[in-house]
Amino acid sequence: MTHEPGTRPAVDRSTVEAILRDRFGFDSFRPGQRELVECILAGRDALGVMPTGAGKSICYQLPALALHAEGGSPCTTLVVSPLVSLMNDQVMALVNAGIPAAYLNSQLSPSQQWEVLDRARAGAYALMYVAPERLSDPRFQAFAESAPVPLVAVDEAHCVSQWGQDFRPSYLGIADFIASLPKRPAVAAFTATATPRVADDIVRLLGLRDPLRVTTGFDRPNLRFEVEQLPDKRKLARIAALALERPADSGIVYCSTRKDTERVHEALVAAGVRATRYHAGLTPREREANQRAFVNDDAPVMVATNAFGMGIDKSNVRYVAHYNMPGSLEAYYQEAGRAGRDGEPAECLLLWSDPDIATCRFFIEQETGNEALSYEEQQVVRASQRRRLAAMTGYCMTTDCLRATILRYFGESVEQEAAQDGETGETPNHAGCGNCSNCEGSVDKVDVTITARSVMRCVHELRGRFGKSVVADVLCGSQSAKIREWGLDRKRTYNIVEDSSATVKEIIELLTAGEYLEISEGRYPLVGLGPRAREAATDEFRLYMKRKRKPEKSAKGARTDVKGAAKGAPAALETDEQRADAEGVPPYVVFSDAALRGMCTSLPRTDEEFLAVSGVGPVKLERYGKAFLSEISRAE
């Protein structure tokens, strides 16, 4: 069954479309899916860079199923996946859809692992999920050498790159494992967050041969983005208000530290929110139980560090909130992208404060680095991390469209309806996506050019020997003992601005994000001039910062509740939850929110009408159709 890359005869297109319809319940492919599926089925390597919720999994699951059924000798596709939780969830969803799949991880006993390998060798599974560490196990290598493996799919492929935000050394062994196989299979790599540099790294480090590279775009139109600058003492109230506004919705709250995770969790529970928590300080049993409670909607809100990371395959998350600012836009977009995977409207709220930036800088400097890198290489990686932090800070502070800022960062061109401001290059607030807090007019754009120029003059006068707080103290005319002791009250830039110290510090961060200033590494970061410092002295230079506008009492942004979509909705949702409980699977595995909404809109009465709902295939019709049609009919 294995073939040299590019030599396998393509599977008939009608067969591919039949599998898509009958096993996955979709009438048509999403952008990029068909090209990747047909490429893989032809035996060619592929790299898919597709946003969360765009359907990456189908790009390798469908070919795996087609190859398993092709000819007279069933074969097994290997899926390299970084997390046990991801394996469990994906295999559960596949089996529920009637697709033979299994996983091989540490949760199985040795005898269970042997049984899985024996069944895989006999062709019982179309897909088998494994962790990258498993590839170096001699027993598994012996299995892979004796069993037909037509395809190796690498999920979360950005983990192979040392320039990515989730580098995992174990991913570096994937290429050697593939090279050790008797016949090289097709190799397909997938990721949701990869800049062009990381994508090139994936191709090189996984040894992809002339791969088809498909980037479908990073835009997630169903996600609404909102950024708020709040002091820490007000963040808790904001998060609690969000959760209490949406009691029926599933949400994730990300925190930077275990301490904040515990504090936010306790506050939400005290406020009456059904929340659980996840961080590395909990025992494996606690983490597993809490994750299962979240996935099954027993605790709809998860408060977590980024240890609750990639591969969360819960499609009905209606909001993701960040209690702290992440260290990079890659990390933020990946985490925020766990909202609305079903394509339905979802909220992404980012709360930040000045201490968040200091925490991110501390993490960068404290990181021990990868022992495989030389000292010089580690310094280059740290410099890259500081640049990513500057971009993240710029996102928090920008007056531009938040969606456009993200897309430009990932190298995607952005077309706006309104012309950009000729002086700043930014899009006015009234233009843009219309689905973020900047574009909706909830912030005012304040010209701080004069103060910014004063900051530049002060940093130049102080010759980069002081940190952000001292610069702000000098400009604001602080009378502290240290300012007088150091003679800084005699500087020409002493007491020349009327803005508050907090505003000056924010302007320093804005200038750093724009590379007009640089903030050094180390325990006591110093502020110096950046590569674009001279541009700040030109007449064309302008700098704006945003201030949240206090709105009149109004709705906080439209959201759609699946329970209120139509008269048949409560019945459909209740039936979904009952079937899930009866089968011991999460409700979204039975039907996604999008499928439920389709039922609520069309109110199907027959098997044919039920099949016409997107996300419903023959397997789910046979398994659930009678119960759902009965409940919808009874509710009319």
Image (spheres, rainbow, N blue to C red):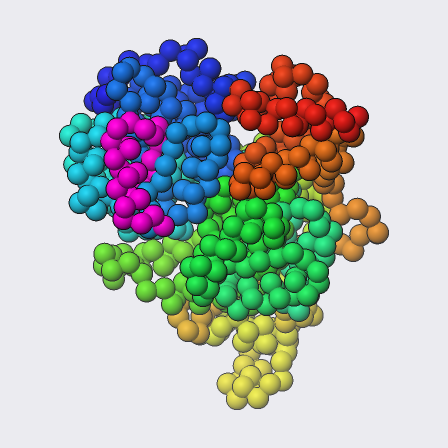
Is 117 in the magenta? yes
The answer to whether residue 77 shows anywhere in this view is: yes
The answer to whether residue 391 shows anywhere in this view is: no
The stretch in magenta equals 107-131
| Residue 602 on image: x %, y % | 71, 22
In the rendered view, does 164 fall on the left or right side of 251?
A: left
User: Of residues 634 and 544, which is closer to you in this image?
Assistant: 634
- In the rendered image of this protein, does residue 508 appear above or below residue 82? below
Residue at 69% x, 37% y: name it.
574
| Residue 365 on image: x %, y % | 39, 66
Residue at 75% x, 29% y: name it.
568
User: Of residues 103 and 164, which is closer to you in this image?
Assistant: 103
Residue at 42% x, 16% y: name it.
16
Residue at 71% x, 29% y: name it.
631
- In the rendered image of this protein, does residue 451 appear above or below residue 289? below
| Residue 260 on image: x %, y % | 55, 66
Is 54 in the magenta? no
Query: Quick one: quadrant of the C terminus?
Result: top right
- In the rendered image of this protein, does residue 139 appear above or below residue 462? above
User: Of residues 465 and 86, which is closer to you in this image?
Assistant: 86
| Residue 130 on image: x %, y % | 32, 42
Q: Quadrant of residue 15?
A: top left
Query: Quick one: quadrant of the N terminus?
Result: top left
Report how many numbered discs are placed on residues in the image: 0
In the rendered view, does 124 fall on the left or right side of 329?
A: left
